Amino acid sequence: MINPKIKIHLSYTGVIDIKNVSNNSVIQIKAGSTIEDILSMLGIKKEHKKYIISIVNEKKQRPPYILQDNDNLSLFLPVGGG
Amino acid sequence: MKKDEFYRELMSRNYKPLDKILSKTTVGIAGCGGLGSNIAHMLTRSGIGKLIIADFDTVVMSNLNRQFFFVEDLGKNKVNALEKNLKKVNPYIQIEKHNTKITSDNLFNIFQDTSIIVEAFDQVSQKAMILDSFLERDEKDKFLISASGMGGIESSNLIQTKKFGNNVYLCGDFSNDFSLGLMASRVNIVAAHQANMVLRIIAKKNTP
């Protein structure tokens, strides 16, 4: 059986170390994937995950949020200093 | 000089559409270090009416390379020293001081009387806390202006203001952290981005 896929629009700001996925791109993911799944899939470091802020369609969502087709996912990881 | 006359003269070289608004506006500043003290300084010179400032720290020597404090302020609470310094610019500015650490529990009480909060923390955990709390609350008529990335002496042209979600703005280069050192020049550029975004929001120009 083929796993259905959905498309999401991904943008990120800050020192998020994502290899092979450019900023402001469309990525295909398995239907039913959560933000947490995407962070793992993108290889986000464990120490960064606790400070990453996730917004889906302009609204903050927590890691268990299940992404829907055509969602806009924005990630931000702040750095220290001030 | 009376208050009305003082404000009129202070703002005589200002951007005119803000003339009647600034002295009636309140802005909250979370943190009074490199960012917060300089943002407060710029907004005071702009003619803002009231600032709510919060910080639990005291002034130490290593602050003097970039923060709006002086040798005479060493050892003093930052909020008290900052109030004194701001009043040297505008004796009529109202300052509401909170000598306390900001947490997700007290954040909205401290800043309940303003629709604009400026994040001016040093620590990543504090920056993430305020962003998380603010976005979770999702109030349509409140704005948060946050900062990230101002370390070292990388190009000034890397520093920008971006919108994140509906009511959050991010200022900085988003990558160079405190480990590269914190210099007055780049910290002040980011502080100026934040202060200018405050003025833009007050003027209802909500684009970065």
Image (cartoon, coloured by chain):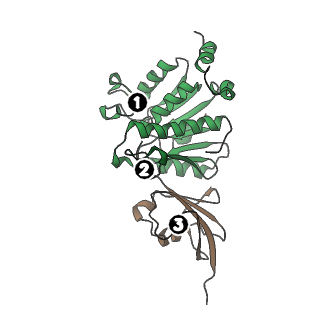
Chain colours: A brown, B green
Residue A52 percent location from the top left of the image: 49, 58
Against B187, is A46 above or below?
below
Instruction: Check disc 3 and report the residue beneath it.
Output: A22
Residue lying at the far bottom in this picture: please name it: A1
Determine the residue positioned at 61% across, 25% down: B14
Instruction: Check disc 2 and report the residue beneath it.
Output: B124
| Quadrant of the drawing holding the C terminus of chain B | top right
Given the image, on which type of amino acid does mark 1 rest?
A: Lys
Given the image, on which type of amino acid does mark 3 rest?
A: Ser
Q: What whole-number distance in Å separates the C-alpha atoms at marks 2 and 3?
A: 24 Å
Q: Nearer the viewer, mark 3 or mark 1?
A: 3
Which chain does the residue under circle 3 lie in?
A: A
Total numbered circles = 3
SS label for mark 3:
loop
| Quadrant of the drawing holding the N terminus of chain B | top right
Both on one chain, marks 3 and 1? no
Against A48, is B206 above or below?
above
Instruction: Check disc 1 and report the residue beneath it.
Output: B78
Question: Residue B105: which disc?
Answer: none
